[in-house]
Structures are given as C-alpha cells and as structure tokens.
Amino acid sequence: MLVSLTLAAAASALLAPASALPAQQQQQQQPFTIGPFQQQINPLKHLSAISPFFIPNQDPTPLPKGCHLTRVSLLIRHSSILGNDDEYEQTMGPFIEKIAAMDKDKIPEDGEWAFLREWKSPIVEENLENLSQRGKKDAKFLGKYIRKQYDELFPSKNEGDLKKNKKKTGASKPPYKVWTASSARDIETAKAYIIGSFPSHQSGDDGEGDGDVVQLVKVPNKARDWDRSLTPHKACDAFEKLSSLEPANQWLSVYAPRIRERLGGRMPKVVKELNDQDILAMQMLCGYETIAQGDSPFCRLFTDEEWLDVEYYFDVRFHHMMGYGSHLAPYLGMPWTKTAKHLLAGKDTDNDGGHPKAFKGLPGPKLPPNATHTQLLHPSFTHRESPAFVAVFLNLFNSTSHAHPASETPALDHRVPDRAWRTSHVVSFLGHIALERFHHKHNGDYVRAVVNGKHEIMSGCEDGLDGSCKWKTFHDWIDERAQRWSDWESVCDKKKD
Ligand SMILES: *[C@@H]1O[C@H](CO)[C@@H](O)[C@H](O)[C@H]1NC(C)=O
Ligand SMILES: *[C@@H]1O[C@H](CO)[C@@H](O)[C@H](O)[C@H]1NC(C)=O
Ligand SMILES: *[C@@H]1O[C@H](CO)[C@@H](O)[C@H](O)[C@H]1NC(C)=O
C-alpha cells in the first residue's frame, strides 16, 4: 500500500503542470498502471456527481468567427465535498462498518486487497457535506479560468484600488454581484471562486467581496420567490430522490455480481459477505477518498469496463431523478433560465438603491437576480440538480441526430455506450452551464449554451452561426418553453389523498 501511494505521488509530481489545470486535470494523462491490470481510463472522470472538477475538453469551444461576447449567465455546481449524506447512509457507511467489523483473517495477507486489513476511510460522518480543501483549490482555479475566458465582462481590476485611484471609483455603481445558494458548501465555493477571479482589494479577505466593487449575495434555500431560481427542487414538495434508486439498483444488480464473481477469485472470504451496494460503495469511495486525501486504493482495483458500468449507474439514476426521465425537470429548470434570459437581454435599468457601504456577513437578497442589469457576467452557485434541470429545459443532448438522445429511457440490462446523456460531463463538482450572448457586427446577436467549456446544441433553437441560436429566436423559444412548463403549483404541490 505504502509503495503504491508513493508511486502515485511520484507519477503526479512528474506530471507537474506547465499550464494551470485543476489538480484533477493534471492526473488524467497518466493511465493507472499500478493495479493488477492496466487501466486506460481515469475513473475520476467517470464518477458523475462524485467526479472532482475536470474539464472534459481541453479548450473551450471558440466563438464563431468575427463575434465577441456581450453577456453571459453562469450556473455552477459547488465544489467537491467530503461525502454526501445520502450516499453515506445508503451505501458507503454500511460498507465501512462491515469492513471494520470483519474478522481480519478473512482478508488476504498480500496482494492488492491486503490494504483492507488496516484500512481506515477518511470519509467520516462528521465531515459529510463539508467542502474539501481540494474543493476550495479547484473553485479558486475555476475563478481564474472564468476570468481568463470572460475577462472583458468583469469589472476592471483597477476599480476600488485605492493605490491607483485617488477617488473610489467603485462607489458610484452598485457592486458586482455573485449569487450563491445558502448551504455552507455553496457559500464556501463561491468565496474561493471570488478569490480566484478578483484582485484582493475587490475580493475581500475571505472572498465575500469588498462590498463596494464586489459583493457575494446569499440566496436563502427556503425563500419562496428566490429559491426557485437557485434551488428550485427545495421549493418543490413533489421532488424526491428515492424513486430513481430503483432503476439504478436494477442496473447495479446486473453489473455488480460480475464484479463480485471476479473478486471471488482474489478474496473469496471477503466477497462472500459483500452485496451489490458494497461494490458501489468501493467505487464511490474512489472518488471521495481521492478528494479527501489525494489518492484512494479503490481507484486501482476495478477494470475500465467496471468503471464505465458505475458511470452508467449514475446516468440511469440521474436520468430519472433530474434529467429527461423526470417530468419535473423542465419545470425546475425554467426559473433560472428565465432569469438568465432577462439578464442577457439587459435592457432595463438597474434600480438597486445604491450599494451598501459596509456590511457584516453576507447581505440578504433585497432584489431578485433578475433585477440587476449593471453587470455583464452573472455567476450563481448551486447544487447538482440545477444544471441537470437547466440542460433539460434547454433541450441539450436531445437532438434526434444522436444515436441515443438524452430523453431516451436508458436500458437496464446493458450499458448504452453511445448515449448522449453523460452526467460526468454535466454535474461533476463545479460542473457549469453558461448561456453566452454574442454579437457579430454584420449579422446581429446570438446565444449559445456551453457546458463545461463545450458548446452544446439547444435542439429547436439552432438557427444561428455554428449551431448557435439567433437572439430573437432564443427570446421567443424560451418564452414558449417557459409557458409550457409554467404551472409549478400543479406539479410541485404534493397531492393530498
Ligand atoms: C463540517 O460541517 C459542520 C456543519 O456545518 C461544521 O460544524 C464543522 O465544523 C465542519 N467541519 C470542518 C472540518 O470544517
Ligand atoms: C423577477 O423575479 C421576481 C421574483 O421572482 C418576479 O416577481 C418578477 O416578475 C421577475 N421579473 C422579470 C422581469 O422576470
Ligand atoms: C426531447 O426530444 C424529443 C424528441 O425530439 C422531444 O419529443 C422532447 O420534447 C424533447 N424533450 C424536451 C424536454 O424538450
């Protein structure tokens, strides 16, 4: 065990980055060759919502020729946490306890599984849902990356700099706002992002903003008119996560027994006591242990096929929970998108009532995000569900030109390799969707959707340059869809029977 840890550390040191890629990105070029077999893929890029931040594509899709950005709205999932409550309770916790209670003589004395004799997971109940150190670093990286990508849409770095300006220039405008849902992991992520994307005189010491040029705004998860735009599922009583476990576990019952059978040859006495959930637990722990301590033995103990199988498990689950398989998804994706459209239109004047001089803690949201027109880039931080809902509302990954469009119900008896619904590319930690409005000096205005740097077609709104959408078409298309999925109360209020 000690040896493989050292090797892994040495391997990542050798790969020391020339460019500033997130920790995750730096590891990916190196196939894991240390286990009992060669892995070609990096499992950390196939763990869906447990994948630490990575950029599926090296470079963001460039704008069509002759165009420049005018406004962008960004929806970003929080960064990596030290375990999810539900996953711990349902899956990882029972496995951890099982191994702890196991007669250690059942565990092989050597070979790749021997580590289980001494194994103590860093994933513990007390820290569940807390942002990790790595998550903070990654969010700061994202801040720099977004600044680089959208620099012209940020307030000038000179604003509010007392050394460069005799007079405070920031004081005449309302502050630039970053919005965040009110859970600690969202707030901490947003702060790290602000530190990464603004100079220190604007970010404030801990990332809450200096209050003059930059301000972090906390949107309470339960505030009725606000929560709908950042955490809509928390305002929708009919939304639930349990029923999606059923199809996912059905698929688990197809692939996990194959793994148990393979492992039976290596540690028969242990495997006798493992069930399907335990297999899933080990694959989840690869992600969370890496987030917590930089490495996990579990990442080297499954084959490529087995990683692709667990990735499919999450795709099945999230298809039903928050993707095209959920009839609630477009309703819940509507509020943020409508707000984004309004902000991208940017024609109303802001009437923010000035800016707060000084504040203690984060200010509450006096005005909804749709009232701000003084800024060109609108970032908001939220949970895994929102980018998925928005993907559905925008009809992404759902073109009939795909072999398996995202709205197709996933098979449960085999993996569908060429499916368009790949949640590892949508809802990894810091997964984000941007709606970009851009201008061509002869042809006018367009909008496109960009998911983690990659332009994705909004099927039905694709009459613009390079598969983007004309502004006017987008405007009407969003209104039409918002109308179609507007009856929130009738779908969200729990039926009383
Ligand atoms: C984890 O979160 C809990 C609840 O918010 C908090 O009390 C605790 O201090 C956090 N632990 C760490 C290590 O940040
Ligand atoms: C902005 O949001 C508020 C609260 O949700 C809503 O009442 C108002 O109609 C919205 N305005 C626009 C222009 O969308
Ligand atoms: C997904 O595509 C199918 C087939 O074109 C279409 O019927 C369906 O309405 C689309 N889903 C959404 C949410 O737009």
Image: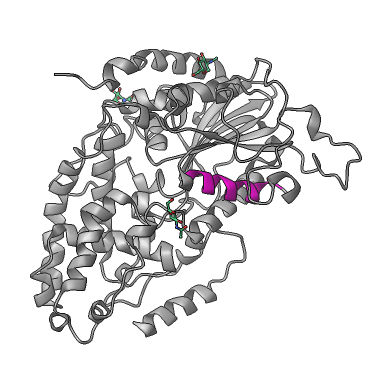
Q: Quadrant of the C terminus?
A: top left
* Residue 158 picture location, percent across and down: 81, 42
In which quarter of the view is residue 41 placed?
Answer: bottom left
Residue at 67% over, 42% down: 209
Residue reaching furthest to the bottom: 109
Within the image, what quadrant is residue 293 found in? bottom left
Q: State left or right for residue 235 relative to residue 412.
A: right
Which residues, given as a range, are shown in magenta? Answer: 186-198
From the image, give the main secondary structure of the stretch colored magenta. helix
The residue most toward the right is 166
Residue 441 included in the magenta stretch of the image = no
Q: Position of residue 409 (x, y in %)?
A: 21, 35
Residue 397 is drawn in which quadrant? Answer: top left
The residue lying toward the viewer, choosing from 135 and 434, is: 135
- Quarter of the figure with the N terminus: bottom left
- State left or right for residue 398 relative to residue 380: left
Residue 73, x across and y down, in percent: 56, 31
Please give the count of numbered marks on the rendered protein. 0
Q: Nearer the viewer, residue 234 or 115?
A: 234
Q: What residue do we see at 31% from left, 62% from top?
A: 285
Q: Quadrant of ligand 1?
A: bottom left
| Residue drawn at the location 67% of the way across and 21% of the way down | 352
Q: Residue furthest front?
A: 360
- Vertical side of 311 occupied by 439: above or below: above
The residue closer to the viewer here, 127 or 197, is 127
Residue 444 in sight from this viewpoint: yes
